[in-house]
Amino acid sequence: MKKCPRCNTKHSGKNARCTPCQSSWSWERQKERRQNTDPEVLYRKSREAMLRTKYRMTSDDYDMMYALQEGRCAICDTWKVSPGLGIKIQDTLYVDHCHAGGHVRGLLCYPCNTMLGHIENFGIDIANIALYLEGRQQ
């Protein structure tokens, strides 16, 4: 049996605190973090967590790719701004990744990323798209 450091009751849980104390402690910590953090820090932390969990990369990796591509989409070559607080998501470059293997390929603008995602997800043959467009140019 463990003894809760907050209320001194005995409990058999996995945490040092009993369940009610653990719950209130967690809530207090979350509230404290939200109140004491400026929006820019929150944005950076959530972006870092998303890049790490979804793409296994850091914001430094993203910034390096952005610099190598000179802030341009890898497909259509349009320039986009670097992501930041208050920047519209359509104005930034998205991380393009292989849906089957998960590896990162590059950075794309919203239209190119969406198009490529549809081509990949629905198994569309790119050669058929080219034939269709050539036939419609007459």
Image (tube, helix red, strand yellow):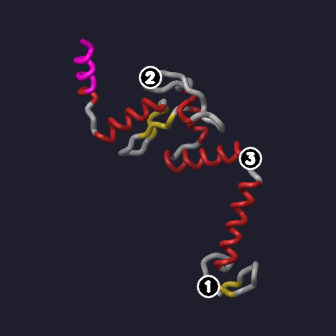
Question: Who comes first in sequence, dot 2 or dot 1?
Answer: 1
Q: Which mark is residue 37?
A: none
Number of other residues with Cα within 10 Å of mark 1, as a class: few under 14, some 14 to 19, many 20 or more: few
Q: Is residue 136 magenta?
A: yes
Query: Which residue lies under the disc numbered 1?
Result: 12
Query: Which residue lies under the disc numbered 3?
Result: 38
Q: Quadrant of the N terminus?
A: bottom right
Q: Position of residue 60 (x, y in %)?
A: 61, 38
Q: Predominant secondary structure in magenta? A: helix
- Residue 13 occupies which quadrant of the picture? bottom right
Question: Dot 1: what SS?
Answer: loop
Q: CA distance from mark 3 to mark 1?
A: 38 Å
Question: Dot 3: what SS?
Answer: loop
- Residue range (magenta): 129-138
Q: Position of residue 82 (x, y in %)?
A: 60, 31
Q: Is residue 44 above or below residue 82?
A: below
Q: Amino acid at mark 1?
A: Ser
User: Residue at point 23% right, 27% down?
Assistant: 128
Question: Who comes first in sequence, dot 3 or dot 1?
Answer: 1
Q: Position of residue 66 (x, y in %)?
A: 56, 30
